[in-house]
Image (spheres, rainbow, N blue to C red):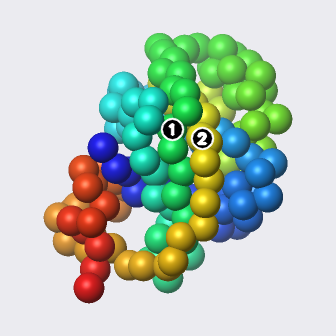
Amino acid sequence: MDHVVYLDHKAKELENLKKGIKTMLIRGAMGRKFPYGKVETGEQLYFIENKGDGLIKASATVAAVINAGPLGSEESMALIQAHQDKLLLNGGLLKRFGGKRYLVLITIKDFQETENFKIDRSAYGNMDDWLPVGDIEKVRAL
């Protein structure tokens, strides 16, 4: 399964992945929301920034996944803090994910920049920050 993952431009997530100082991604919600339980080791992630250019700029492979929940607020924050050296969350992202009942922590490997390309999002009505696309070639815009 291929996934398109939106990264926070203000938090410099893509830049930190490129530098190799960020090696883990996080998603969280109060309920079991995608990608909770839906991402597996060996799957491919394609990265796009949330700054409106709509370009896939890099990819990586899922090395490990932690699906945690339900968590209390303090447990949620403790889990994030325990992995902050790999997550490198800024204040905004800490506030966004801290205290969530369900967290997904995804360790990546084999990060590489790709030739930029656009995707066709027309099959994905919701404006989510994680899209399970199946095969990236099927959503690559011509």
The answer to whether any part of residue 100 appears in the image is no
* Three-letter amino acid code at the position of disc 1: Val
Residue 124, image x, y percentages: 23, 61
Closest to the observer, 32 or 12: 12
Q: Residues within 10 Å of mark 1 (few under 14, many from 20)?
A: many
- Residue 87 lies left or right of residue 33; in this view the side is right
* Three-letter amino acid code at the position of disc 2: Ile
Query: What residue would you read off at disc 2?
Result: 108
Residue 113, image x, y percentages: 60, 67
The answer to whether any part of residue 133 appears in the image is yes
Q: Label 2 vs label 1: CA separation? A: 5 Å
Residue 114, image x, y percentages: 53, 70
Residue occupying the point 73% across, 19% down: 78
Residue occupying the point 45% across, 30% down: 41
32, above or below 20, in the image: above
Quadrant in the picture for the N terminus: top left
Residue occupying the point 35% across, 38% down: 34
CB under 8 Å between discs 2 and 1: yes
Query: What residue would you read off at disc 1?
Result: 62
- Residue 119 lies left or right of residue 97; in this view the side is left
Residue occupying the point 65% across, 33% down: 98
Q: Secondary structure at mark 1?
A: strand
Quarter residue 85 falls in: top right
